[in-house]
Amino acid sequence: MANKKAKGPRAKTRHKLKGNKKRVTVNRLLSKPEIDATVQININSSVHSGMPHPRFHGLTGKVVGYRGRVVEVRLKHGKTEKLLLVHPAHLNILEVENK
C-alpha cells in the first residue's frame, strides 16, 4: 500500500520556502508598514505566525489596515480580490515614486 499524499499547508513547497539564510531581526518583526503602502509577500519560513498560503508567495498588494499584530493586505489573485492577514516578517515594503 502506497503512502498517503501530503495535503498540509506546506505541501509542495520544498524550494519555495527553502531557508534563504535571512535572519529575522527584531526590527523586521516589529515593523509596521503604512496604510496604502505597496508590499510584496515573501514568506520567511523561520517565522510560523501569520504565514500566508504559499500560493501568494511573490505577489504584490496594498496595506489596508491592521488586526492586532498582523497586516491586512488586499491583492488581486486572478479575477478576484483577496484580503490576506500577514505578519510583517513576510512583507517587503516597495519604494514607489509618487506621481
Image (cartoon, helix red, strand yellow):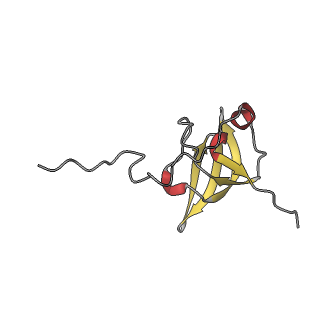
Question: Looking at this view, is 16 or 54 the one in front?
Answer: 16
Q: Which of the image's four quarters has the C terminus?
A: bottom right
Q: What's the residue at 72%, 33% (across, down)? A: 30
Q: Quadrant of residue 46?
A: top right
Vertical relation: 94 (above or below) 48: below
**Where does residue 57 sit, x and y in percent of width and height?**
56, 55
Task: Using residue 23 as the reference point, say whether residue 56 is left or right of it.
Answer: left
Marks counted in the figure total 0
Question: Looking at this view, is 86 or 42 the one in front?
Answer: 42
Q: What's the residue at 75%, 39% (across, down)? A: 32
Q: Quadrant of residue 60?
A: bottom right
**Where does residue 55 sit, x and y in percent of width and height?**
49, 56
Q: Residue furthest left?
A: 1
**Where does residue 91 sit, x and y in percent of width and height?**
66, 47
Question: Looking at this view, is 60 or 73 the one in front?
Answer: 60
Q: Residue furthest right?
A: 99
**Where does residue 52 sit, x and y in percent of width and height?**
53, 46
